[in-house]
């Protein structure tokens, strides 16, 4: 009788422990092992196999054509950086790399910094067709690096190693801190964050927020899939809110819940490209990990965002939609989701926009 009572108590205790663990945490032998997306979202097909041969063949059909005004010349970039150095501004460095300058806090944030020509290991991976408008040496003083996840187009080991200011405050999702600490950044300045963790940096409140995505560092095998977390960031200061979205796929519940919890939000950054992998994936314009432009606008409306900045486009070929398709669809469909066209914001590579014009 005592033995059965012991078993019942042990089972109940284990259930209580399991109830305390967040849904997105996956444990193996009692140790945090991996992560998963929020409940209710689309699932990646576990039997799906990527076909590099088909991708390379289809990629060759894409024309790298963009208007010359997509890229601001280096001389103008440096001139504008000096001109606006005392102002609050946003500057696009390409893809998901932005400088966000908050003058009233004397604080500059750098998001997902990748400065190399190839977005991959060594000399592999997608090659940028547009260079970063600034080199690492040309960057203004950066106070915070906010890194959303470990994919090569968002996290560059070479950038981390060669970054000129290793005293910078680093904000990363769980299991990514070691990439910084082993490259000369102090443990005190490297902050691993779980979803809903909050930290204050010189008057800037930063909350790690869930996203519908995944993580993987190696380009072969499945052994390291989802071993590190992915996260969006909510920046708050003086009554203003800026949302920097991790790559995200569509989710029928998540962004409505986040909108109730954090909205309204003044301005948000979100991915508008890397959504079409047809014929590798049999459905056009659909991805569980990246929204197409219309899906992003819908999610941002759920999130109660006032202005949306389209990112993750116009820098390197990661998928099979035409290069100039995402920004056109983003602008042309804004009104269908309750936005004015001017509220669907696009940057040129190297462009600076004053933050006061984005937050009003």
Image (cartoon, rainbow, N blue to C red):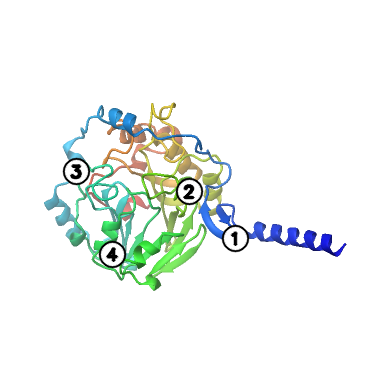
Q: State the CA–CA distance, disc 1 to disc 4.
A: 39 Å
Q: State the CA–CA distance, disc 4 to disc 2.
A: 25 Å
Helix or strand or loop: what does disc 1 sit on? loop
Whether residues under marks 2 and 3 lie with C-beta atoms below 8 angstroms apart, the answer is: no
Q: State the CA–CA distance, disc 3 to disc 4.
A: 23 Å
Q: Which badge, 1 or 4, is on the more N-terminal residue? A: 1
Helix or strand or loop: what does disc 4 sit on? loop
| Residue 321 appears in the picture as rendered | no
Which of discs 4 and 2 lies nearer the camera? The answer is 2
Residue wearing tag 3: 71
Residue wearing tag 4: 142
**Image: 62 above or below 192:** above
Pick whichever, 211 or 216, lies toward us: 216
**Relative horizontal placement of residue 227, taking residue 54 as reference (left or right):** right
Q: Categorize mark 3 by other alpha carbons within 10 Å: few (<14), some (14-19), many (20+).
A: many
Instruction: Quarter of the image for the N terminus: give it.
Output: bottom right
Q: Which badge, 1 or 2, is on the more N-terminal residue? A: 1
* Quadrant in which residue 105 is drawn: bottom left
Q: State the CA–CA distance, disc 2 to disc 3.
A: 30 Å
Tally of numbered tags: 4
């Amino acid at each position: 009788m005592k033995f059965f009572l012991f078993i019942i108590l042990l089972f109940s205790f284990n259930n209580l422990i399991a109830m305390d663990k967040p849904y997105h945490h996956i444990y193996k032998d009692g140790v945090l092992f991996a992560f998963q997306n929020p409940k209710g979202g689309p699932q990646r097909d576990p039997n799906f196999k990527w076909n590099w041969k088909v991708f390379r063949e289809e990629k060759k059909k894409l024309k790298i054509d963009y208007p010359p005004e997509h890229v601001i010349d280096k001389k103008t970039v440096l001139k504008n950086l000096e001109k606006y150095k005392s102002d609050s501004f946003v500057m696009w460095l390409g893809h998901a790399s932005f400088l966000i300058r908050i003058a009233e806090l004397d604080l500059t944030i750098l998001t997902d910094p990748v400065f190399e020509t190839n977005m991959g290991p060594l000399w592999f991976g997608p090659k940028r067709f547009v260079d970063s408008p600034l080199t690492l040496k040309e960057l203004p003083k950066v106070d915070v690096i906010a890194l959303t996840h470990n994919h090569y187009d968002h996290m560059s080991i070479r950038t981390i190693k060669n970054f000129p200011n290793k005293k910078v405050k680093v904000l990363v999702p769980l299991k990514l801190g070691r990439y910084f600490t082993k490259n000369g950044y102090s443990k005190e300045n490297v902050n691993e964050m779980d979803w809903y963790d909050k930290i204050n940096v010189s008057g800037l409140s930063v909350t790690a927020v869930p996203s519908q995505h995944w993580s993987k560092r190696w380009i072969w095998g499945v052994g390291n899939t989802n071993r590190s977390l992915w996260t969006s960031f909510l920046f708050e200061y003086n009554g203003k809110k800026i949302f920097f979205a991790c790559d995200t796929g569509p989710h029928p519940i998540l962004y409505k819940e986040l909108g109730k919890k954090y909205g309204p939000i003044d301005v948000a950054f979100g991915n508008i490209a890397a959504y079409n992998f047809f014929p590798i994936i049999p459905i056009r314009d659909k991805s569980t990990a990246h929204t197409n432009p219309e899906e992003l606008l819908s999610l941002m409306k759920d999130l109660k965002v006032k202005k949306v900045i389209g990112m993750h486009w116009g820098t390197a070929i990661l998928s099979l939609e035409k290069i100039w398709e995402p920004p056109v669809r983003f602008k042309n469909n804004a009104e269908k989701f309750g936005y004015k066209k001017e509220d669907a914001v696009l940057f040129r590579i190297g462009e600076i926009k004053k933050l006061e014009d984005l937050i009003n």
